[in-house]
Amino acid sequence: GVFWDKKRVYDDGSNFNPPGYTPTSSTRIVAVNGTNRLYEWPVNIKYVIIPEKHSLFVTAGLSSYFMKRENYDYEYIQNNQPGGHNYLSYENETKDWFSVANFSVGYAHRLGATGSIRIEPYLKLPIKNLGVGNMPIMSTGLNIGFTKQLTR
């Protein structure tokens, strides 16, 4: 599948490293807030542990992130004094192929021939830093959905 995601990014400045940014010895980034709009292309393998009306399953795989828009607001200090804020925006800059590991455990309840309802908490861990800002974007969440097998 393909997901259209919005990821929020927070950092103390230790990971933020956009291209062209070369801080002087008297300048230090102390906070970064950002948002990333991206397409996510996951490739996962699902293993059904209990294949019954009430089923339990696990999934694992990799995702590629295609950053469409990255916005960063970073705060810095200069000579140990508040320096201010800077804003950076990038569009269509990076494609991070198979750079995020996906893990989930899920429960599905079959509703007869109608289909199944499922609930699936997930964890997405970066294999490398992502996007122009080179940030370690980790995600957690909950997928809730309805599935139906397509047959002739």
Image (cartoon, rainbow, N blue to C red):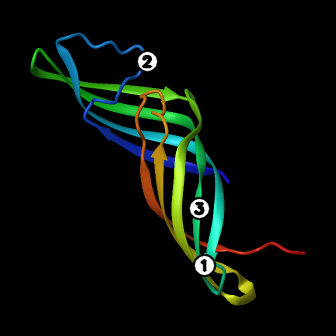
Which residue corresponds to mark 1?
Answer: 117
Residue 59: numbered disc: 3
Picture residue at 57% right of the left edge, 49% below the top: 4
Query: Which amino acid does the dot numbered 2 rest on?
Result: Pro
Which residue corresponds to mark 2?
Answer: 19
- The Cα atoms of the two marked residues, 2 and 1, are separated by 45 Å
Residue 47 coordinates in the image, percent (x, y): 64, 67
134 or 67, nearer to the observer: 134
Q: Residue furthest front?
A: 49
Query: Which amino acid does the dot numbered 3 rest on?
Result: Thr
Picture residue at 68% right of the left edge, 54% below the top: 1
Residue 3: numbered disc: none
Residue 107 coordinates in the image, percent (x, y): 55, 76
In the image, residue 80 sits, relative to residue 53, either above or below, namely above
Picture residue at 9% right of the left edge, 20% below the top: 81
For marks 3 and 2 on the same chain, the one whose residue lies earlier in the sequence: 2
Label 3 crowd bin: few (<14), some (14–19), many (20+), radius 10 Å: some
Query: Which amino acid does the dot numbered 1 rest on?
Result: Ile
For marks 2 and 1 on the same chain, the one whose residue lies earlier in the sequence: 2
Q: Nearer the viewer, mark 3 or mark 2?
A: 3
Instruction: State which quadrant residue 92 falls in.
Output: top right
